[in-house]
Amino acid sequence: MKRNTNHFIAALLLLSSFLMGSCLDTADDVLVEFADLLRQDTIAINAYVKKKNLSPRVDVNGIRFVITTLGTGLPPRNYDEVEVTYDGKFLNDETFDSGNVNGQVGGFVSGFSTALQLLPVGTSAILIIPSVYAYGASGNPSGNIPPNAPLIFDMALNKVVRTAGQNPLLISDTTAIRNFLDAKGITGTIKDPSGLRYKIINEGTGTSPGLYDRVKINYSIKLLSNEQLVASGTSQKSVTFDAWVVNYLPAVQIMLKKLKPGGRAIMYVPSELGYGPTPFPFIPGNSNLIYDLELVQVEPE
């Protein structure tokens, strides 16, 4: 059955189904209920995984994915438009829907949206999403999805659909970067096909990380427009961040796969490969960046 786009692409914020559907009195009560339901989901999902003899990767949210064909493009961002083919099932292998859908990544249910941003374009995968990141305690009666139902999607991320404004913006950004380099007399940079410009200061030694290897990095970020330092520090695995290569900005993903432990590079990043149109603290939307990246450590998956 083809999914009604309004059902499948209804944006769900984390915990929204509990906040709207719960009779509990406090935010703490809601979080307790969320944690309890996630534990129940995890028990059921682990039983399914064992029964099917699957070996999924598991992100910090408990979303599981098994890659059957690994693509070669960059993963989409939350604001990207994508084309996806899918077959949706419950843990009893009953199909509730299948088809082909186009939509903005951030407009899908939260677990599906999160998983898409972990998959390179061209990837086929099996996604196993806890109910708390799908339709939760409310379910979706019009979509034949009962409450508290973990969902499985056998899916393919066919393509990212570029919007009309992206190509002109990329041209403008790369022109601004070229002009900056010329004005500063910076030579010897390498131009990646993506539009990223970079200079490797030290390649490092050992083996470059893969997309799902965990990394520890040191970084500093400046705005290209005025060379103002806006962020610096160390990034590594935490309880809320996997620190897989795929979790980082597109420019950082590209660069990490060119470095080895101990390696360092300076990147001149067009906005599309940085934070895109989304403003961050001290980083306006559509900002070109100067990104100093050091790969400190690689933890193979």
Image (cartoon, helix red, strand yellow):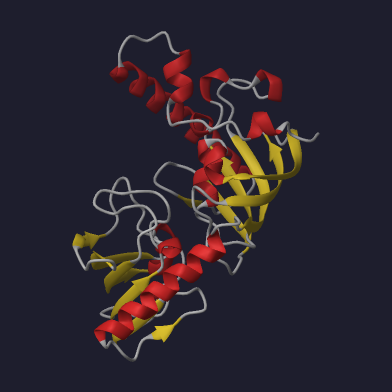
Q: Quadrant location of residue 205?
A: bottom left
Q: Residue at left 49%, top 63%? A: 169
Is 223 on the left-hand or right-hand side of 178?
A: left
Q: Position of residue 92 (x, y in %)?
A: 69, 33
Quadrant of the image for the C terminus? bottom left
Using the image as rendered, state which of residue 45 and residue 171 is in the foreground: 171
Q: Position of residue 269 (x, y in %)?
A: 37, 70
Q: Residue at left 36%, top 79%? A: 179
Q: How many marks?
A: 0
Quadrant of the image for the N terminus? top right
Residue 123 to residue 269: above or below: above
Residue 50 to residue 93: above or below: below
Q: Residue at left 34%, top 91%? A: 188
Residue 287 to residue 95: above or below: below
Q: Position of residue 148 (x, y in %)?
A: 55, 23
Residue 184 to residue 147: above or below: below
Q: Residue furthest bottom?
A: 188
Q: Residue at left 49%, top 53%? A: 77
Q: Quadrant location of residue 31?
A: top left
Is 25 on the left-hand or right-hand side of 78?
A: left
Using the image as rendered, state which of residue 300 and residue 77 is in the foreground: 77
Q: Position of residue 91 (x, y in %)?
A: 64, 34
- Please say whether residue 111 is visible from this viewpoint: yes
- Please say whether residue 300 is visible from this viewpoint: no
Q: Residue furthest right?
A: 1
Is 95 on the left-hand or right-hand side of 301?
A: right
